[in-house]
Image: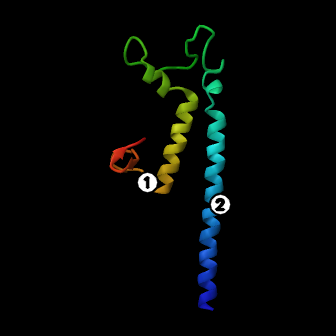
Amino acid sequence: MQGSESGTGERDREDKKHVEGKRFMDLLLQAREELKVEKLFGKEYWGSDGMWAYEIDQKEEEATFWQIADQHPLLRNWLGRVRDEVRKAGIMNAEDGFVRIGGERQI
């Protein structure tokens, strides 16, 4: 009986890995679709004059490239989603909130 329970536990773990893998693949496909260049630079986010059409929290008189990019609604959404997934997976550095791979800060 013990061997049967052990096999069931392993099968459950494999099923969970499969479900998680599929979920991550679905997220990846969704990200690829939503983060296409034509969507990032769509009329919804940019005016015909080339200026952004979303709110920017500026610290200086003129917004910098990084402020504009950092506050783009699609990028903001996906960075938040990636951080949430990284936290769920337990690989987020609790001290500074960044992922570290090989000791180097990633996101």
Task: Name the spot of residue 26 as percent of width and height, x first.
Answer: 66, 48
- Residue underneath mark 1: 91
Residue 4's mark? none
Residue most toward the front? Answer: 102
Q: Report the coloring of the rendering.
A: rainbow
| Left or right side of 59 for 8 | right
Q: Residue at x 50, y 54 (%)?
A: 88
Instruction: Name the quadrant containing residue 29.
Output: top right
Picture layout, residue 90 above or below residue 97: below
Residue most toward the bottom? Answer: 1
Of 10 and 102, nearer the camera is: 102
Task: Name the spot of residue 39 as percent of width and height, x first.
Answer: 65, 26
Residue 19's mark? 2
Task: Name the spot of residue 64 as percent of width and height, x first.
Answer: 42, 18
**Disc 1 to disc 2, C-alpha distance:** 19 Å
Asked if residue 99 shows in the view, the reply is: yes
- The secondary structure type at the circle numbered 2 is helix
Quarter of the image that includes the N terminus:
bottom right
Task: Name the spot of residue 14 as percent of width and height, x first.
Answer: 62, 69
Picture layout, residue 4 above or below residue 77: below
- The secondary structure type at the circle numbered 1 is loop
Asked if residue 57 shows in the view, the reply is: no
Residue type at mark 2: give it.
Answer: Val
Q: Residue at x 43, y 24 (%)?
A: 66
Q: Residue at x 62, y 39 (%)?
A: 31
Instruction: Name the quadrant containing residue 48.
Output: top right
